[in-house]
Image (cartoon, rainbow, N blue to C red):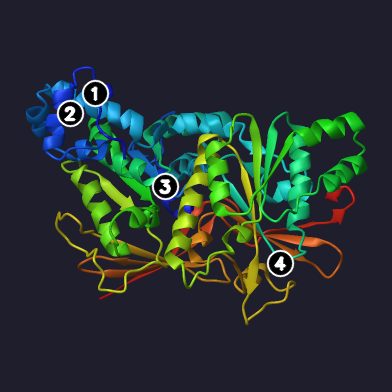
């Protein structure tokens, strides 16, 4: 918590600050908790100066205040198309800025293939950067190039698109936290974190339950900040566990969803804004089901295929 | 928390448009956004539904006044009553609660302050501060919120996940009076796993009500309600 300094107000002198400290008012939190009239007595400032001081603290340290019409204006250009037609239709246009989208599925269900394709499509269709945070060393530049070749892109275009995909390999949650803090997010069109469970494998949830949930809490707050303050859509990937009352992939979507669970535990369940379940179907294709979402109907589905030109 | 439930409370902004009663409240809403599940396009869609389904306009046979331009104008006007405070860490959240007094003093239209959710920074605060129980933590946040909104005639609404509970007796209790660290209503929401059906148990000092509802594109559609003591 920030400490009270003379920078906060022109009339707040060193002696006034030490007077406040003698009354155990050290931080801006202590200042805002204290009654204005008492602050007048302790600091020697006028009532108006105390109100100005509190207003300055509000502007500098509280959450950012947005009015409804400004939010509406900001949301108007806030949809990034994945470039996969059926998925964009399912998502009502594409990936919404400021939202965390989680793709869940078992191993080999196509999560990384989907991430590769979306990264290539977004990099191709915009002039911004796609940040690909790779925790399993799964990102393959060759695969991205093959997707572009099969889409009929020229060599020049392939280089241009690949230059727009910034891949960072990380191994621990600490590395991710430090990256999220230090990245320059301007001109970023999309952030992909593939995949999350690898970051938390080192925690034994039974032994380190508190540290585990604390790390998830810090991570959640940080990606919400990146998404919200820089208006960037985020994709994360996660695994799933199946329960004994396993429902076949072809059973009703809502019944099916109640028989699987995303990994990472209860705390993480509610963090992503939308969660999608990616599954193999009996034919060669994949089925994507909306698992939970603040704006999409749960249980709605679409079908995709993995081809040489990526996911279509 | 499904935000459509709270959106339904928020959508009633403007009161009249071209002489037609919209049943709006002209009431301001402040959302302290900590879980970041709020999605403004969904709020706008619900407001459009609310306007299109306006009964008074239907009775008058004047639904045509609500063309896309008219609806857009009503929504833009109504959104002036809506403020979001985006918080990303604990100190921002607590300072935002402390600044509510100033925000309320500058805008007498504000009738509701909603926090989604009050326990977002519980684990962060537990690491750096005391070994709070979840209930004790919520109680202390409630205390700060009530202290900094005292004297203003507003509705305070907060959400918290029901899967993290304290093992001891519930600390935040119901009251019928104005009491710090106490609440008037507790609304427990449940979702049935494999169907689109929900239920709400509304508990107050004097009464318990069970309600069932579904969530559709029109927001909440209430189905049944019965009381039990």
Residue receiving disc 2: A17
Q: Looking at the rendering, which quadrant does residue B88 occupy?
A: top left
**Disc on the earlier residue, 2 or 1:** 1
Residue receiving disc 1: A6
Contact (Cβ within 8 Å) of mark 2 with mark 4: no
Whole-percent x, y for residue A77 in the image: 62, 31
Residue A172 falls left or right of residue A128: left
**Disc on the earlier residue, 2 or 4:** 2
How crowded is the residue under tag 1: few (<14 C-alpha within 10 Å), some, or many (20+)? few
Residue B34's label in the rendered image is: 3
Q: CA distance from mark 4 to mark 3?
A: 31 Å
Query: In the displayed structure, would residue A218 be above or below residue A206?
Result: above
Nearer the observer, A277 or B151: A277
Quarter containing the C terminus of chain B: bottom left
Residue A106's label in the rendered image is: 4
Q: Chain of mark 1?
A: A
Of badges 2 and 3, nearer the viewer stands 2
Q: Are marks 2 and 4 on the same chain?
A: yes
How crowded is the residue under tag 2: few (<14 C-alpha within 10 Å), some, or many (20+)? some
Q: CA distance from mark 2 to mark 3?
A: 32 Å
**Secondary structure category for the residue under label 1:** helix
Contact (Cβ within 8 Å) of mark 4 with mark 3: no
How crowded is the residue under tag 3: few (<14 C-alpha within 10 Å), some, or many (20+)? many
**Secondary structure category for the residue under label 3:** loop
**Disc on the earlier residue, 4 or 1:** 1
State the residue at coordinates (93%, 38%): A152
Number of marks in the image? 4
Of badges 1 and 3, nearer the viewer stands 1
**Secondary structure category for the residue under label 4:** loop
Q: CA distance from mark 1 to mark 3?
A: 30 Å
Residue at far bottom of view: A244
Of badges 4 and 1, nearer the viewer stands 1
């Amino acid at each position: 918590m920030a400490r009270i300094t003379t920078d906060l107000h022109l009339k707040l002198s060193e002696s006034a600050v030490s007077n406040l400290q003698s009354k155990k008012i050290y931080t801006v939190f202590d200042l805002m908790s204290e009654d204005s009239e008492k602050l007048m007595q302790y600091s020697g400032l006028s009532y108006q100066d105390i109100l100005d001081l509190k207003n300055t603290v509000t502007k500098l340290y509280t959450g950012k205040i947005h009015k409804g019409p400004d939010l509406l204006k900001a949301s108007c250009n806030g949809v990034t198309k994945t470039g996969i037609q059926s998925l964009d239709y399912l998502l009502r246009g594409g990936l919404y800025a400021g939202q965390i989208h989680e793709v869940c599925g078992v191993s080999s269900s196509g999560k990384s293939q989907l991430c590769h394709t979306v990264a290539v499509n977004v990099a191709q269709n915009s002039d911004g950067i796609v940040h690909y945070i790779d925790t399993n060393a799964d990102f393959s530049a060759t695969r991205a190039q093959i997707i572009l070749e099969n889409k009929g892109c020229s060599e020049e275009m392939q280089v241009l698109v690949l230059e727009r995909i910034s891949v960072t390999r990380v191994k621990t949650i600490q590395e991710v936290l430090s990256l999220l803090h230090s990245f320059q997010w301007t001109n970023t069109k999309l952030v992909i974190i593939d995949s999350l469970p690898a970051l938390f494998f080192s925690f034994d949830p039974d032994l380190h339950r508190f540290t585990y949930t604390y790390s998830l809490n810090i991570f959640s707050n940080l990606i919400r900040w990146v998404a919200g303050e820089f208006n960037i859509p985020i994709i994360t990937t996660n695994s799933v566990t199946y329960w004994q009352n396993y429902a076949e992939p072809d059973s009703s979507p809502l019944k099916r969803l109640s028989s699987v669970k995303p990994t990472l535990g209860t705390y993480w369940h509610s963090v992503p804004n939308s969660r999608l379940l990616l599954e193999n179907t009996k034919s060669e294709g994949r089925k994507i089901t909306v698992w939970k979402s603040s704006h999409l109907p749960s249980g709605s589905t679409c079908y995709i295929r993995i081809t040489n030109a990526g996911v279509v | 928390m499904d935000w459509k439930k709270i959106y339904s409370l928020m959508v009633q902004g403007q009161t009249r448009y071209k002489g037609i009663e919209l049943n709006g409240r002209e009431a301001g809403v402040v959302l302290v956004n900590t879980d970041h599940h709020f999605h403004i396009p969904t709020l706008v869609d619900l407001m459009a539904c609310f306007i299109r389904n306006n009964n008074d306009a239907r009775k008058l046979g004047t639904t045509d006044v609500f063309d896309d331009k008219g609806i857009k104008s009503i929504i833009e006007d109504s959104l002036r009553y809506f403020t979001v405070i985006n918080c990303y860490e604990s100190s921002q959240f607590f300072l935002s609660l402390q600044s509510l007094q100033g925000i309320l003093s500058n805008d007498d239209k504000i009738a509701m302050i909603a926090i989604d959710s009050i326990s977002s920074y519980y684990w962060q605060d537990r690491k750096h501060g005391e070994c709070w129980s979840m209930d004790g933590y919520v109680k202390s946040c409630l205390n700060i919120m009530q202290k900094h909104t005292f004297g203003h005639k507003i509705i305070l609404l907060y959400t918290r996940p029901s899967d993290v509970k304290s093992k001891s007796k519930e600390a935040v209790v119901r009251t019928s009076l104005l009491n710090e660290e106490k609440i008037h209503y507790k609304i427990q929401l449940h979702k049935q796993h494999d169907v689109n059906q929900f239920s709400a148990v509304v508990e107050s000092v004097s009464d318990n009500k069970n309600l069932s509802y579904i969530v559709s594109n029109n927001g909440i559609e209430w189905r049944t309600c019965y009381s039990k003591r």
